[in-house]
Amino acid sequence: MLQHFYSEEAVRYNSMEIAVILQKFRELLHYNQTLNQHLINNTYWLKMTEQGLTDLFPFIEKGKLLRTLYRMKELGLILQKQDQSNTYWFTVNDLPVENPAAPSHSVSPQAQAFVNGQQVEPASKRLWSDVNQEFIAESVAKLVAKHGYDQNHFFEIWHTFAASMDANGEQPPARMDLIQKRFVAYASKVQMNLAHGNRRYQHTYNQTAEKREQAVEAWLGYIDKMPPEFVYKVDSSGLQASLDFVWNCFIRKSYEKQIPLKNSYQLENGFSVFVNTWRQNELKDQQKPSYKPRGGYQKVDHSDTSWADDIDLEGL
């Protein structure tokens, strides 16, 4: 097809240079279309410097090359724009020209708008979210095999990735393998960040667990070591058991419930609540039908402290 255009246009315009330039421009525009690059206002463009032009056609003298491009522009064969950085933009108008001597007026409105420096919204825009999920399944399978998560995990990453690309206004490449590579790179980065986050969480969790374990162990240091001032601060009137015995029960119960010991306030207030509840428990035992006083003391099962499980010692 390109060779056909080449021979026909060389005769039509009586110019081998026009035929060669058109053929090369079409090849490069097709390449841009394949890679989906330089798509502006629904038209694919070539972007090159003046040096790039002369390098592309080394067999055409520079002055003649520029004159030929100007003639092609006048004939309506190409559209040309030069930006502020002296970079040239070209696209080919492939509509047939019946009279080579007359300029073609069948120019794409979007392409002409770009040449004139205007902005035109594209008629349609391809979206990442429109890519068929079946085409992503192969990449998802590879990611599952590598990272060990289920498919839904990576499909969720795909949806997040596609939504982000659409929000940034970036269109997907025309080639599916490039779409897959972009997605795999994004998913791999997400997994790397997830792994780092898991390690940080595990490190923090281990530190927290170690500190909690040490705080729980701290209770055992108070066995048989009730602070003397607690004797005066805690109301022990009416207790059948000795205050030291109740204190040790309080310490063991707190350790048994794996409560972290935070400060002396927790000790003092926790013990006060424990003593009051202990006294109430003794009164309940006295009201049981099976209760029988022995000597000057009342019969109470002090070894059973399961009633203290309902006390919120940690929240004190």
Image (cartoon, rainbow, N blue to C red):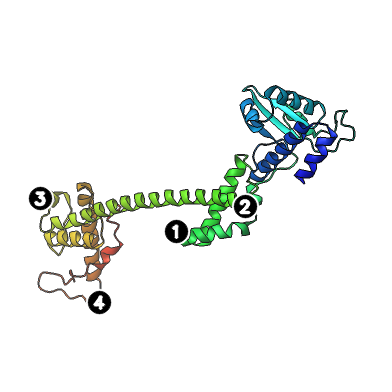
Disc 3 marks a residue whose amino acid type is: Pro
Q: Give the mark, 4 or 2, whose residue is nearer the N terminus.
A: 2
Q: Nearer the viewer, mark 1 or mark 2?
A: 2
Q: Give the mark, 2 or 3, whose residue is nearer the N terminus.
A: 2
Disc 4 marks a residue whose amino acid type is: Pro
Tell me if label 4 and label 2 are in contact, CB under 8 Å. no
Q: Which mark is residue 228?
A: 3
Residue 74 visible to the viewer: yes
10 Å crowding of disc 3: few (<14), some (14-19), many (20+): few
Q: Which mark is residue 176?
A: 2
10 Å crowding of disc 4: few (<14), some (14-19), many (20+): few
Q: Give the mark, 3 or 1, whose residue is nearer the N terminus.
A: 1
> Between 268 and 144, which is closer to the camera in this rendering?
144
**Residue 35 in the image: x percent, y percent?**
63, 44
Instruction: Please identify the residue farthest to the bottom as the structure is shown.
Output: 290
Tell me if label 3 and label 4 are in contact, CB under 8 Å. no
Residue at 50% of width from left, 49% of height from top? 185
Disc 1 marks a residue whose amino acid type is: His
User: What is the spatial separation of the Cα atoms under label 3 and label 4, in whole angstroms?
Assistant: 38 Å
Q: Nearer the viewer, mark 4 or mark 1?
A: 1
**Residue 195 in the image: x percent, y percent?**
40, 52
Could you say whether the residue bearing mark 2 is in a helix, strand or loop?
A: helix
Residue at 20% of width from left, 75% of height from top? 291
Residue 196 as seen in the image, left or right of residue 129: left
| Residue tagged 4 | 289
Could you say whether the residue bearing mark 3 is in a helix, strand or loop?
A: loop
Residue 43 visible to the viewer: no
